[in-house]
Image (cartoon, rainbow, N blue to C red):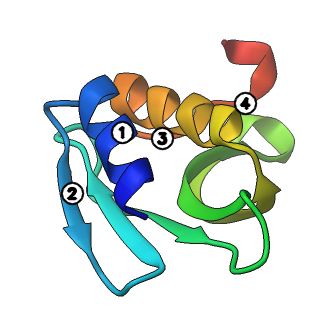
Amino acid sequence: MKELLIELKSRFGRAEFNDVSSTVLEVNFKKNNEPVLIEKEIESDRYTISYPQLIEQAKGKRTIHYSTSHHLLLAGVIWILNQVEKNGKVMPAYSL
């Protein structure tokens, strides 16, 4: 996790980082109220990440849902963190 923390601090210097455990890192941005949790998978260089996501439902109703994605490479983690830093949440793909 140390290598991940160094990489993320270089990209997201304004974020707050907290070690939750030896395999879990918490990332907080000013635009969102919920932390992003990143867990290193034990036997691979992949990650599980939990983050706020905007979900659009029928009749245009929008809700913020806490989502989890599994088996992500570092590039996927960075994409999600970019979204949360920019928007406070991950936006639907069609609204990007």
Q: Is residue 14 left or right of residue 36?
A: left
Q: Earlier in the sequence, mark 4 or mark 2?
A: 2
- Which numbered marker is on residue 89? 3
Spot occupied by residue 21 in the image (x, y as percentages of width and height): 35, 87
Q: In what quadrant of the picture does the C terminus appear?
A: top right
Secondary structure of residue under mark 1: helix
Q: Earlier in the sequence, mark 1 or mark 4?
A: 1
Spot occupied by residue 28 in the image (x, y as percentages of width and height): 25, 53
Q: What residue is shown with label 2?
A: 17
Q: Please, what is the three-letter code of the amino acid marked with disc 1?
A: Leu
Q: What residue is shown with label 4?
A: 92
Secondary structure of residue under mark 4: loop
Say which of marks 3 and 2 sits in front. Answer: 2
Please tell me how crowded label 4 is: few (under 14), some (14-19), or many (20+) other residues with Cα within 10 Å: few
Q: Is residue 38 left or right of residue 56?
A: left
**Marks 1 and 2 in Cβ contact (< 8 Å):** yes
Q: In what quadrant of the picture does the N terminus appear?
A: bottom left
The one nearer the camera, 46 or 54, is: 46
The one nearer the camera, 8 or 79, is: 8
Q: Earlier in the sequence, mark 1 or mark 2?
A: 1
The one nearer the camera, 96 or 12, is: 12
Say which of marks 4 and 2 sits in front. Answer: 2
